[in-house]
Amino acid sequence: MIQATGVPDYSVVIPVRNEAHNILPLIAELKTVMTAHQPYEIVIVDDGSDDATPEVLGDQARACPELRVIRHRSGAGQSAAITTGVNEARAGIIITLDGDGQNDPADIPALLDRFREAEDPEKLLVTGQRQKRRDSLLKHLSSRVANAVRGTLLGDHTPDSGCGLKVFSRPAYLAMPGFDHMHRFLPALMLRQGGRVLSVPVNHRPRQHGATKYGVFDRLGVGIVDLLGVMWLQRRPGMTVFGGGGAGLADSLGRRWLERRTVAPEIDQGANEESGS
């Protein structure tokens, strides 16, 4: 349990949107798994849910001292929610997973073991590689195509970069250029700043309730643009958020892309920092 003035060793960051029926079982599983990895906190970022998710999380936060709830006033996307959670996290080691229950919390210890045994974990991204995908055929095929294209063009050597279950250091994430949909490119971004990526086989479970909130067709167009943007970033390793890099046409277009893809969600201050006593 986190004491009032204590700092956790691990922050579990979960982006959610309209997951009222899935989030409570996931929290219960996380509490069981993380009992062996104390002190820890669970940071859930509600990305503008318009179902019962805010009420469910509010009730749970009052009963669970490890849980912190942050809410975006409107939906800003999965990457923005992850970034909000990492920014608000207290621990130096971040664990992320999706809020739909398809990632299995029981896989977290295996990823943590690989992270902690590394000589330089500050520069390591440990990501899950989902086995026996439990998604629709369309989503599964689109994910395979996307991973193949990303792997070929970005050289990130990551067979499943879209898996939500990841472990990395908070400073390494915050050093990355931030943009919408960046969570799909974390392996390439980690390699860009001199880090390593390690894939670990993990379980994948069928969704029990609801439907995916971040679909296939609504991200294809921006995915291509972002892919080109990340390729540009790879050629500009010294590029920060809006500074550095060259002055040619490619750099001008690249900086314009990065600026236009930056997301600054509005935080609902009344929903923040709900926790048990």
Image (tube, rainbow, N blue to C red):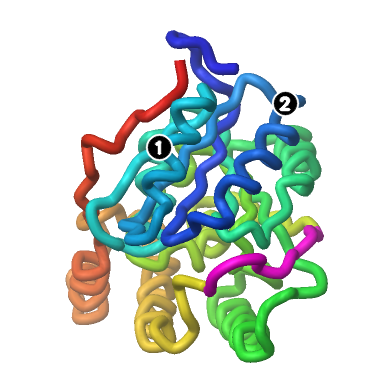
Residue drawn at 23 percent across, 35 percent down: 270
Position of residue 90 measured from the top left corner of the image (x, y, whole percent): 45, 27
Q: Position of residue 111 (x, y in %)?
A: 74, 45
SS category of the residue bearing label 2: helix
Question: Is 46 drawn above or below residue 7 in the view shown?
Answer: below
Disc 1 is placed on an element classified as helix
Q: Amino acid at mark 1?
A: Gly
Magenta run includes residue 202: yes
Q: Main secondary structure of the magenta part?
A: loop
Q: Which residues are magenta?
A: 201-211
Q: Nearer the viewer, residue 236 or 45?
A: 45
Name the quadrant of the N terminus.
top right
110 relative to 238, above or below? above
- Residue at 61% over, 81% down: 143
218 horizontally vs 148: left or right:
left
> How far apart are labels 2 and 1 at the CA level?
22 Å
Give x and y (percent) for residue 206: 71, 69
Q: Residue at x 30, y 62 (%)?
A: 75
Numbered label attached to residue 151: none
Q: Is residue 181 magenta?
A: no
Q: What residue would you read off at disc 2? A: 35
Please rate how many residues cluster around mark 2, counting C-alpha atoms within 10 Å: few if below 14, some from 14 to 19, many from 20. Answer: few
Which disc number belongs to residue 58?
A: 1
Q: Residue at x 62, y 90 (%)?
A: 138
**If you read the primary sequence from the N terminus, does the residue marked by circle 2 or circle 1 appear first?**
2
| Residue 98 in sight from this viewpoint | no
